Amino acid sequence: MAKIFCVANQKGGVGKTTTTVNLAAGLAKVGQRVLLVDLDPQGNATMGSGVDKRALEHSVYDVLLGEQGVAEAAVDTPKAGYRVLGANRELAGAEIELVNLPQRETRLKQALAEVAAQYDFILIDCPPALSLLTLNGLCAAHGVIVPMQCEYFALEGVTDLVNTIRQVHANLNPDLQIIGLLRVMFDARITLQAQVSEQLKAHFGDKVFDTVIPRNVRLAEAPSYGLPGVVFDGSARGSKAFVEFAREMVQRVQHM
Ligand code: ADP
Ligand code: MG
């Protein structure tokens, strides 16, 4: 049965999509069966996996509205090694349409249950908001991966998310836990980043992943080629870090 993880942080531009796409590719590289679910109307994870969001026949939108099953709506990626349930602008409307539907928070959870046996990991890329879409991701997941940059206000930003996760855990999804905080775009030469990194470890202990993702331009270039960095340039430092992170995740799920 698949372990399901949300990659979430209500801030934009912190590395959610880069993490989702490269963790998916890293997991595929170490032999795991992976489904990536794009829950962001921007569709960046879809495009970054090599799937054209404008040409999607079906998307996560149809799945949330109950018009398609995941198995029919997901597509293979040509080179990335995993399957994608894609998203595009259409998904922006789902926020409003979902409000009046029954079980509006658990529609993704129900849909994923039908394919969970076919995968080892399902990764959900969340939009930068604590919206009904993100709530669907959190309700469907066993755990949350929180990418964050080691900046001055990083801890403060994470507090809101931690509180939301607590509420979802208490009211909607007792399975949900924070799997870990992932330090991304890290530059050890910047003293402040090293300090914040230490603070994070002091505050969150083993909820901070061992793997650190460095700032690496190859990871930023890869999406324009429709490839995860891990596939685009496997020898880049950032790509190696994501494969290592994939191994760390495989280890962690053995204890879940
Ligand atoms: P989010 O999904 O949280 O909005 P993205 O994953 O899209 O964030 O990342 C924001 C920007 O930072 C993108 O341009 C991306 O290519 C770049 N980026 C993300 N991670 C790294 C990294 N480790 N090194 C260099 N650039 C990165
Ligand atoms: Mg994103």
Image (cartoon, rainbow, N blue to C red):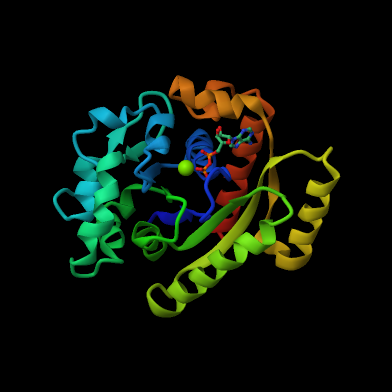
**Number of marks:** 0
Q: Is residue 189 left or right of residue 72?
A: right
Residue at 28 percent of width and 34 percent of height: 75
Q: Is residue 6 left or right of residue 117?
A: right
Ligand 1's quadrant is top right
Determine if residue 256 is in view: no
Residue at 61 percent of width and 24 percent of height: 218
> Residue 148, image x and y in percent?
63, 50
> Residue 105, image x and y in percent?
30, 66
Q: Tell me if residue 50 comes above or below residue 65 in the rendering.
A: above
Residue at 43 percent of width and 75 percent of height: 174
Q: Tell me if residue 200 comes above or below residue 48 in the rendering.
A: below
Which of the pair 194/241 is nearer the observer? Answer: 194
Residue at 57 percent of width and 50 percent of height: 249
Which of the pair 98/202 is nearer the observer? Answer: 98
> Residue 16, image x and y in percent?
52, 45
Residue farthest toward the bottom in the current orientation of the protein:
170
Quarter of the picture holding the N terminus: bottom left
> Residue 186, image x and y in percent?
72, 41
Q: Quadrant location of residue 175?
A: bottom left
Determine if residue 178 is in view: yes
